[in-house]
Amino acid sequence: MSGPHCVGKQAWPELVGEKAEVAKEKIERENPTVRARFIKQGHYRTMDYRCDRVWVWTTEGQTGVVVEVPKVG
């Protein structure tokens, strides 16, 4: 779900399987209003919704590979 007040690209399905750092660079280049945040697959995250954050689920944090579609939230 994206909020009506969120601007720019909201999801990056093409990044599944990509290296985490490459994904971060692309996300922040394509939507400069967000910051990518790495989270290791299986770990918990805060449930609040923020238009300036993109969760990037990876196998090993920032050194891993993206395993889920990165989305604003």
Image (cartoon, helix red, strand yellow):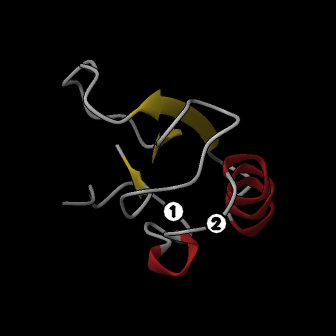
How far across and how far down the image is residue 58, in percent? 48, 43
Identified at 73% across, 69% down, the residue is 30
**In the drawing, what numbered circle is on residue 18?**
2
Give me the C-alpha separation between circle 2 and circle 1.
24 Å
The C terminus: image quadrant: top left
For label 2, count other residues whose C-alpha is less than 10 Å away and answer few (under 14), some (14-19) or many (20+): some
Q: How many marks?
A: 2
**Which residue is situated farthest in the bottom direction here?**
14
Instruction: Give how far across and how far down residue 15 sits, in percent.
Output: 57, 71
* Residue at image location 41% in from the left, 57% down from the top: 67
* Helix, strand or loop for disc 2: loop
Q: Position of residue 8 (x, y in %)?
A: 56, 68
Identify residue for label 1.
7
Q: Nearer the viewer, residue 33 or 16?
A: 16
Residue at 52% from the left image edge and 55% from the top image edge: 66
Q: Amino acid at mark 2?
A: Glu
Task: Tell me if residue 43 comes above or below residue 33 in the rendering.
Answer: above
Residue drawn at the location 38% of the way across and 64% of the way down:
69
Q: Does dot 1 land on a helix, a strand or a loop?
A: loop
Q: Is residue 43 left or right of residue 72?
A: left
Mark 2 or 1, which is nearer the eye?
Answer: 2
Side (left or right) of 57 relative to 45: right
Q: Say what amino acid the circle numbered 1 marks.
A: Val
- Does residue 19 sit above or below 49 in this rendering? below
In primary-sequence order, the first of circles 2 and 1 is 1
Q: Quadrant of residue 1?
A: bottom left
Assess disc 1: are there few (<14), some (14-19) or many (≥20) residues with their C-alpha within 10 Å of its C-alpha: some
Q: Position of residue 10 (x, y in %)?
A: 44, 66
User: What label sits on residue 69 in the rendered view?
Assistant: none
Q: Given contact means CB atoms under 8 Å apart, are the residues at marks 2 and 1 in contact?
A: no
Q: Nearer the viewer, residue 16 or 1?
A: 16
